[in-house]
Image (cartoon, rainbow, N blue to C red):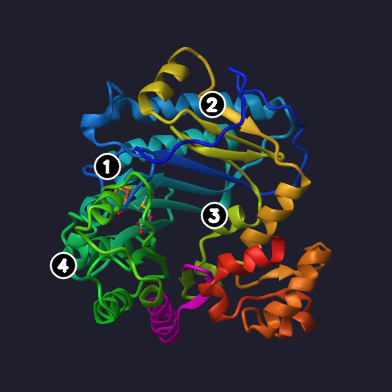
Amino acid sequence: MGSALPIGEPAPRDGSLPVAIDSPSQFGVYLHVPFCRVRCGYCDFNTYTAGELRGARQDEYADTLLREVDLARGVLADRGPIRPASTVFFGGGTPTLLPPGDLGRMLEGVRASFGIEPGAEVTVEANPDTVTDATAAELAASGVTRLSIGMQSAVPHVLAALDRTHEPANVRTAVEAARAAGLDVSLDLIYGAPGESLQDWRISLASACALEPDHVSAYALIVEDGTKLARQIRRGEVVAPDDDLQADMYELADDLLGSAGYDWYEVSNWARGDEHRSRHNIAYWAGADWWGFGPGAHSHIGGIRFWNVKHPAAYAQRLAGGESPAAARERPDAAARALENVMLRTRLRDGLPISELLGEGRHAVASLIADGLIDGSAAVHGRIVLTRQGRLLADAVVRALTD
Ligand SMILES: C[S@@+](CC[C@H](N)C(=O)[O-])C[C@H]1O[C@@H](n2cnc3c(N)ncnc32)[C@H](O)[C@@H]1O
Ligand code: SF4
């Protein structure tokens, strides 16, 4: 059921926003689908198995979410001109647990309410077991352009350690189905699972590259509080990920993906050419506006952040009563925005303009260059660009720049 929501001021029940929206910023749409067949032991996303739904219905979900789309249109139209979506992202959970027709209807609702820019990127996250030729073709026909498949690993004992139940052979099936339907393909990998060796990770990377995806995300396994994995580690049943091994795994990913033709562009993301980078995620990292629909989804509009009630039953109940599902909101002050800007931009290949740092941060740049964590040419080109070592220590770099 995932981690707790942040604290903020209560959001008004009509969902109204206290700002005029006149910014030319891109508008992204995130649609959360909070269902999974089983919960993976490491995952704390806001997602629910059938037994945890407390009466919320998967077969009514598309209609429920479309009520929030209607409400959002009203709220935004009240504040400024409606902007068409430049990116749409169905995330989860497992969006492909819903029939493709439901995803198509939600997309149609977004199109009818806001418009979708020509050439927009429309991504659907998928578990490999849930993609067939027919699903992929139907998704493509409804306007989806990109499938992001949760491969995680190609090694059976690593998948077992992650509690993944998908059939490894289905990754190839899903990739081929997506390709045949003309969709861009991204693969998610995780490294550092209990018992995973550097050689196991090499096998997973090689298998991923052999499938020739357009994009790869490789995430260091994070032990999230409250997960089964955290309990297993606490009880001594499995060992926690080793930082040094994860660092070696990151370097191996960067080497193998680089030599297979994937360009690194964000700490955990590589793409085969700029046109295959995730435009939706880049917009998040650049601080653009987006509306997140669905239980627990977060939004960022005109400098206001707000987030929805977490449980699908509470979400459906609010919307059935004609009320906004927003739970709370906040308006980050200038200092919080500056910190966020540093945290997000230093993760990107394009880096952070040094001119955006305050005095202390500028002093920190010199010592980070001396330590080899940021590229020495940064000072010349006026941007902070992390070296590979800096990427491994991105959090430490951010701390140095913002303390
Ligand atoms: C919503 S899931 C992707 C789609 C689908 N639910 C699946 O898992 O196949 C998003 C991705 O987040 C990553 N992820 C989730 N929990 C993680 C954790 N604790 N540490 C690292 N990566 C994690 C996984 O790679 C996963 O594919
Ligand atoms: S399938 Fe994806 S969203 Fe669902 S529990 Fe596993 S990692 Fe989390």
First reached walking from the N terminus: tag 1 or tag 3 = 1
* Residue type pointed to by label 2: Ala
First reached walking from the N terminus: tag 2 or tag 3 = 3
Badge 1 vs badge 4, beta-carbon distance below 8 Å: no
In the picture, which quadrant includes the N terminus? top left
Q: Is residue 262 magenta?
A: yes
Residue ID for mark 2: 327
Residue 38: x %, y % from top left: 21, 44
Instruction: For mark 3, give the secondary structure.
Output: helix
Farthest residue to the top: give it: 321
Residue 216: x %, y % from top left: 41, 69
Residue ID for mark 1: 36
Q: Residue at x 19, y 58 (%)?
A: 237
First reached walking from the N terminus: tag 2 or tag 4 = 4
* Residue type pointed to by label 1: Cys
**Residue 207 vertical position relative to residue 165 in the rendered view, above or below:** below
Q: Residue at x 75, y 47 (%)?
A: 24
Instruction: For mark 1, give the secondary structure.
Output: loop
Residue ID for mark 4: 156
